[in-house]
Image (cartoon, rainbow, N blue to C red):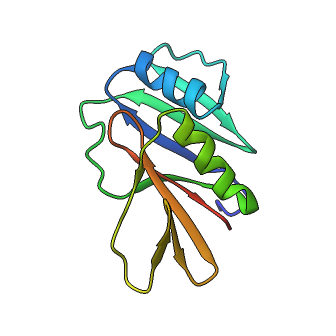
Amino acid sequence: MLKNREAIATIPVKKLDVARKFYEGTLGLARVPSDEPEVLVFSSGNTQLLVYESQFAGTNKATAATWAVGDELEDIVRDLKAKGVTFEHYDLPDTTRKGDVHVSGNTNVAWFKDPDGNIHSLVNG
């Protein structure tokens, strides 16, 4: 039923104007026109990210969205750090850290938060 359908990450934020600056300016996502005034839609590859105002913004303690960036992971981490993004560091089993990148076998991951505390990640997969 859903296996051939695109999924849309849905991210709650406190203020749309702050979120727009982060997702569009810092992350470099392109805005998609939307008929909904209380929603921001961004394109990311073949998918979309929907951002909306909610009193529950930033309350999720798990990863909300992940970007598979392949071999560009370290370059993207460096570029985002230059734009002021702070990366999260976690103590995880069987995982070491190379700077801001967590390494577990062949999987490399870097986590960061948006201005509301929503957790996002970049993965080399």
User: Would you say 30 lies left or right of 57 here?
Assistant: right
Give the camera-side residue of 13 and 123: 123
State whether residue 123 is above or below residue 115.
Answer: below
Give the camera-side residue of 35 and 16: 16
State whether residue 101 is above or below residue 14.
Answer: below
User: Would you say 119 lies left or right of 78 here?
Assistant: left
Q: Residue at x 30, y 51 (%)?
A: 60
Q: Name the quadrant of the C terminus.
A: bottom right
Q: Name the quadrant of the N terminus.
A: bottom right
State whether residue 52 is above or below residue 80.
Answer: above
Give the camera-side residue of 74 and 40: 74
Percent position (x, y) of residue 73?
66, 57
State whether residue 74 is above or below residue 26.
Answer: below
The image shows a total of numbered marks equal to 0
Q: Residue at x 47, y 34 (%)?
A: 84
Q: Residue at x 59, y 35 (%)?
A: 27
Give the camera-side residue of 47 and 15: 15
Q: Residue at x 53, y 45 (%)?
A: 9
Percent position (x, y) of residue 113?
40, 44
Classify residue 90 by image quadrant.
bottom left
Percent position (x, y) of residue 34?
61, 19
User: Would you say 32 lies left or right of 60 here?
Assistant: right
Percent position (x, y) of residue 11?
44, 39
